[in-house]
Image: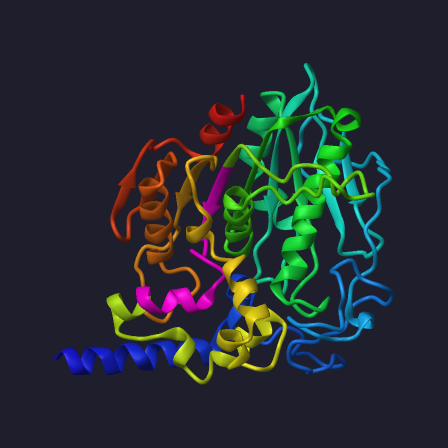
Amino acid sequence: MAFHFLQHARLLLAAFLLIAASGCTQLTRLPGDRPGQGQRPGGGRGPGGQGHGGNTTTKPGGVDASAAAATYVSELTLNNSAAPVAVSNKYAANVHYGTSDRLIFDMYLPKGQTPAPLVIFIHGGGFANGSKDHFHKRFAPEITAWTNAGFGVATINYRFLREGPDGVKNSLRDIQRCLQFIRYHATELGIDKNRIGCMGISAGAGSSVWLGVHDDLADPNSADPIARESTRIQAVAAINPQSSYDIFSWDPMFMEKYGVKPTEDPRFKPRVTEFYGTSDFQALTTDPAFVAMRKDLDMPAMMDRSDPEMWFASDKEVDKPSDVLHNSIHIKRLVDTAQSKGIKVNAQVPSLPLNVGSSETLQQFFLRTLK
């Protein structure tokens, strides 16, 4: 019986990796697999010009500078627009924090007493697609509640895996930069630098956790004043997150529960290398540069008592071994590790079941932690 179960689990995983749908499951699809776009694993085509990701001729993801995105900007330009959600706040759409069309965010500016708390939404899509616009559609009641409470609310875009030299680090650098850009312009935006929370779904959820647990990425010696801004945030909310962006750390979880290791499936390996900006799977475990990169992406390993309070949720009624991206065991790993480090955690996951901390809603969580 056990043998047949394991065989069934492996078949389900293989099937999922072959037919993964669009949207938040895009980690299992080669980004850019559409007409007119290059198929170079780990490379990709982005806007021309010098990127901001360091030396683009060295590993990880060693590609020429033409693959890197356009540069960041420092200036704030706000154009008042009609808000997608019916609120009385001023609303600015497509605010640039870089010269690329991907490096933009929308913001409901706070009204009333300032400086005000801020909630930042990071969209999902497996770092391969998605848009900030999803936030307006799915979270309209929360936007209304937060703006009514005097909050600012932002939703951001960022580069995808193939739009720069370093895979997922392209996206995370942009997310980091957008946070620092907003902090640098906090006075103009009416924002309190010390009351900022991040939230997201899937890739956006994992990115929020990564920001929440990572040591401060501010560079106090930088000539760029925005780079000197802190990246520490005060609250994290994550819906269907991945537990770590060291994908090799997923193997023990899935092996224990389902008897499968995602990184050993030959259909998954090209997606893993794409994620890190290379085509050399073996290098991910042998090359010191990639090993260091994976370490910098391993959220549970970075957790400590200084990290902000976290709120987790899953919309999965049943977990399946084929769902390597959004299986609730990701949340369990994050919750267990956070609790062991003394971090305050709230999690309601019916499929496990897991009930930890408060049962408050997402809306209530930020109203309490940032107010």
Residue at 50% x, 47% y is 209
Left or right of 18 in this view: 215: right
Name the residue nearer the viewer: 333 or 362.
Answer: 333
Q: Residue furthest left?
A: 1
Left or right of 252 in this view: 145: right
Residue at 66% x, 47% y is 176
341 to 282, vertically: above or below = above
333 to 165, vertically: above or below = above
Does 241 appear in magenta? yes
Left or right of 101 in this view: 309: left
Q: Give x and y (percent) for residue 136.
A: 63, 43
Q: Give x and y (percent) for residue 275.
A: 57, 70
Residue at 76% x, 66% y is 55
- Point out the stretch of residues depicted in magenta: 236-253
Q: Quadrant of residue 181?
A: top right
Q: Give x and y (percent) for residue 188.
A: 80, 26
Q: Quadrant of residue 310?
A: top left
Task: Please say whether residue 300 is visible from this viewpoint.
Answer: yes
Name the residue nearer the viewer: 188 or 294.
Answer: 294
Q: If the image is split into quadrants, where does the N terminus sit?
A: bottom left
Q: Residue furthest bottom?
A: 266
118 to 321, vertically: above or below = above
Residue at 61% x, 50% y is 134
Task: Please say whether residue 320 is visible from this viewpoint.
Answer: no
Does 217 appear in magenta? no
